[in-house]
Image (tube, rainbow, N blue to C red):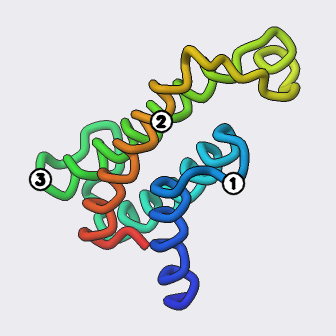
Amino acid sequence: MKFTALLLIPLLAVTLACPPSQPLEQTARDGVATAKGYLDSAKGKHPECVGTTPASSTNCSIITRGVGAKDAVIDALNVYCASADYSNNGGPCVPNKDAQPKLQEALSSLNQTMKDVKAIGGK
């Protein structure tokens, strides 16, 4: 389990920091999936941060920011890939190059936030 967690940390950093050798939308999906794993782990270590009224601690604030950063990537990805087929039927992404900077910015923010999540126990 620890070995897997140790592999995920560099994967997220490489996924978000290196120029993509895969389509940007795949990089975003990979980043969201990795972030979900970190967040689930952090929530498991800080159960006081889960629920409709999480505790107002630094750890809970970091988890809340992490969820927001992950959701921002999902929203930016949906704009980047927007097409009728993608939105309605889960069809292929049709990249909107005008939305690319926002998606890259959201990914960068996610990467920074996940460093904080990792520091409080997200693995």
Would residue 52 be found to the left or right of residue 2 on screen? Answer: left
Q: Is label 2 in a helix, a strand or a loop?
A: helix
Residue extending farthest top: 84
Give the image location of residue 62, x and y in percent: 23, 51
Residue placed at 49% from the left, 89% from the top? 2
Residue at the spot of label 2:
104
Residue at the spot of label 3:
57
Amino acid beneath label 3: Ser
Query: Mark on residue 79?
Result: none
Give the image location of residue 49, x and y in percent: 28, 53
Amino acid beneath label 2: Gln
- Dot 1 or dot 2: first in sequence order is 1
Q: Residues within 10 Å of mark 1 (few under 14, many from 20)?
A: few
Q: Quadrant of the C terminus?
A: bottom left
Tell me the CA gap for discs 1 and 3: 39 Å
Residue at the spot of label 1:
21
Occupied quadrant, residue 79: top right
Residue placed at 64% from the left, 40% from the top? 24
99 vs 44: above or below:
above
Amino acid beneath label 1: Ser
Give the image location of residue 119, x and y in percent: 25, 70
- Dot 3 or dot 2: first in sequence order is 3
Query: Label 3 near label 1: C-beta < 8 Å?
Result: no
